[in-house]
Amino acid sequence: MPSNVDALFIGGNGMRAIGAISAIERSLRMPVITANQVAFWQALGKANAPATVKGYGQLLAKSPAV
């Protein structure tokens, strides 16, 4: 992986990557986000639901701005 990469994006909705995100982040030592994960995180923010979800990557471990 190039040294100037800040994160890994897994696009598309057909891959069920949610259970592997934390392991991939540990292995690559960088954030990993998926299309479904970002959509869910954004929906939490739009619903003013400051929630965190542990074990599914760095993005879901942070509460969206409400």
Image: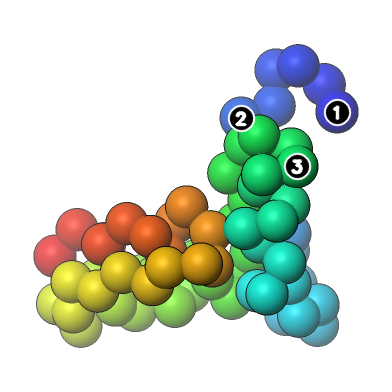
Residue 17 picture location, percent across and down: 73, 72
Asked if marks 3 and 1 touch (Cβ < 8 Å), the reply is no
Q: Is residue 13 left or right of residue 45?
A: right
Q: Secondary structure at mark 2?
A: loop
From the image, tell me which residue sits under label 3: 27
Q: In this orientation, does residue 9 appear?
A: no
Circle 3: is it few (<14), some (14-19), or many (20+) Cα within 10 Å?
A: few
Q: Secondary structure at mark 1?
A: loop
In the rendered view, how is the structure colored? rainbow
User: Amino acid under label 3?
Assistant: Ser
- Residue drawn at x 47%, y 52% as measured from the top left: 58
Q: Is residue 55 left or right of residue 51?
A: right
Q: Is residue 24 above or below residue 35?
A: above
The nearer-to-camera label among 3 and 1 is: 3
Q: In the rendered structure, which disc, 2 or 1, sits on the residue that comes first in sequence?
A: 1
From the image, tell me which residue sits under label 2: 6
Residue 33 bears which disc, if any? Answer: none
Q: Quadrant of residue 29?
A: top right
User: Amino acid under label 1?
Assistant: Met
Circle 2: is it few (<14), some (14-19), or many (20+) Cα within 10 Å?
A: few
Q: Secondary structure at mark 3?
A: helix
From the image, tell me which residue sits under label 1: 1
Q: In the rendered structure, which disc, 3 or 1, sits on the residue that comes first in sequence?
A: 1
